[in-house]
């Protein structure tokens, strides 16, 4: 199997040339810049669209910076430039606001959010209140795959796709396991946005990288990556005696099982 990947970048034209299936650019101006800032946002998106052609999927990341009226006005203003989705327009706890924006856009522009939700309970609010079209949990921020898979399962009951925020290999493994995770995000961290570099820097020398718009699963066990331990230092060193003492304390979990409630 292979997983399609889009690129978050300031250079969608380069992302397109690198083979990504879509690109997401930042929204630099907010409500405090007024109509002039709104016009600049529209112009920036227009130029991005011109650089990639009319059909290449193009999205806008607003990073919690807008208001309800501004988000609606901006999204509608970008309809003529074939915007795919507008992302994280409001602070994460404004569920009513997301619901209002979602109703106003009515699917003409997809609304996405979720990277700043950290448990299934927040995602339940997003789903039950019909706050968005796509959920975007960050697997490394929400405690790993254990919590993330519960969110993905909940989303499937609402026919809501899950496109995780960043997270590289941790997202990839989750997405290969669930059919409602159709697309991965690659955040381009190279200085000029012209190279595909590892998301985790030099931490994993075998971190899988997108090629020709997709990423393939590793054949290695676990997450399929090797941790570079050179330079890693335990912040609180323990003596051999302390290690043995901890092992003895852990043995209490081998007691006879009891009725849990």
Image (spheres, rainbow, N blue to C red):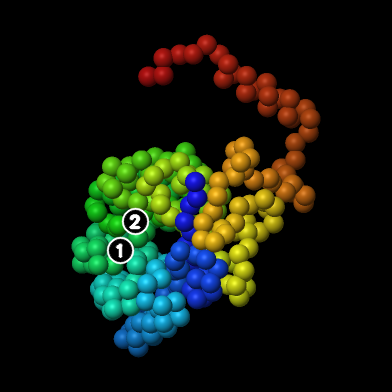
Q: Residue furthest bottom?
A: 36
Residue wearing tag 1: 110
Residue pictured at 72% horizontal, 44% vertical: 234
Q: Residues within 10 Å of mark 1 (few under 14, many from 20)?
A: some
Q: Earlier in the sequence, mark 2 or mark 1?
A: 1
Residue pictured at 25% horizontal, 48% vertical: 128
Task: State the image coordinates of residue 184 (x, y, percent, origin top left).
Answer: 47, 55
Q: Check the image and report above or below for 202 versus 252.
A: below
Task: State the image coordinates of residue 66 (x, y, percent, origin top left).
Answer: 34, 71
Q: Are marks 2 and 1 in contact (CB under 8 Å)?
A: yes
Circle 1: element type: strand
Residue 101, picture quadrant: bottom left
Q: Of the numbered discs in the image, which one, if any, rests on residue 134?
A: 2
Q: Check the image and report above or below for 260 versus 134.
A: above
Residue pictured at 72% horizontal, 49% vertical: 228
Q: Of the numbered discs in the image, which one, if any, rests on residue 158?
A: none
What separation in Å lies between label 2 and label 1 (alpha carbons)?
8 Å
Q: Is residue 85 visible?
A: yes
Q: Nearer the viewer, residue 223 or 52?
A: 52
Task: State the image coordinates of residue 140 (x, y, percent, origin top left).
Answer: 52, 49
Q: How many marks?
A: 2
Residue pictured at 36% horizontal, 54% vertical: 135
Q: Check the image and report above or below for 158 versus 210.
A: above
């Amino acid at each position: 199997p292979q997983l399609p990947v889009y690129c978050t970048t300031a250079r969608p034209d380069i992302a397109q040339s690198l083979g990504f299936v879509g690109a997401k650019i930042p929204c630099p101006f907010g409500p405090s810049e007024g109509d002039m800032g709104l016009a600049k946002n529209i112009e920036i998106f227009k130029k991005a669209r011109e650089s990639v052609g009319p059909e290449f999927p193009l999205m806008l990341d607003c990073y919690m910076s807008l208001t309800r009226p501004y988000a609606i006005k901006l999204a509608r203003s970008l309809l003529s430039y074939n915007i795919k989705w507008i992302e994280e327009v409001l602070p994460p706890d404004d569920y009513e606001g997301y619901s209002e924006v979602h109703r106003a856009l009515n699917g003409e522009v997809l609304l996405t959010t979720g990277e700043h939700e950290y448990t299934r309970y927040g995602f339940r609010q997003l789903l039950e209140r019909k706050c968005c079209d796509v959920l975007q949990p960050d697997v490394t921020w929400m405690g790993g795959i254990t919590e993330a898979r519960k969110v993905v399962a909940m989303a499937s009951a609402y026919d809501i796709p899950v496109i995780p925020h960043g997270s590289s290999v941790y997202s990839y493994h989750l997405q290969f396991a669930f059919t409602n995770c159709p697309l991965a995000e690659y955040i381009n961290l190279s200085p000029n946005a012209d190279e595909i570099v590892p998301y985790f820097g030099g931490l994993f020398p075998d971190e899988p990288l997108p090629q020709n718009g997709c990423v393939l699963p590793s054949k290695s066990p676990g997450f399929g990556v090797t941790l570079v331990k050179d330079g890693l230092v335990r912040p609180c060193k323990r003596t051999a005696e302390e290690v043995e003492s901890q092992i003895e304390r852990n043995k209490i979990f081998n007691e006879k099982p009891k009725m849990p409630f």
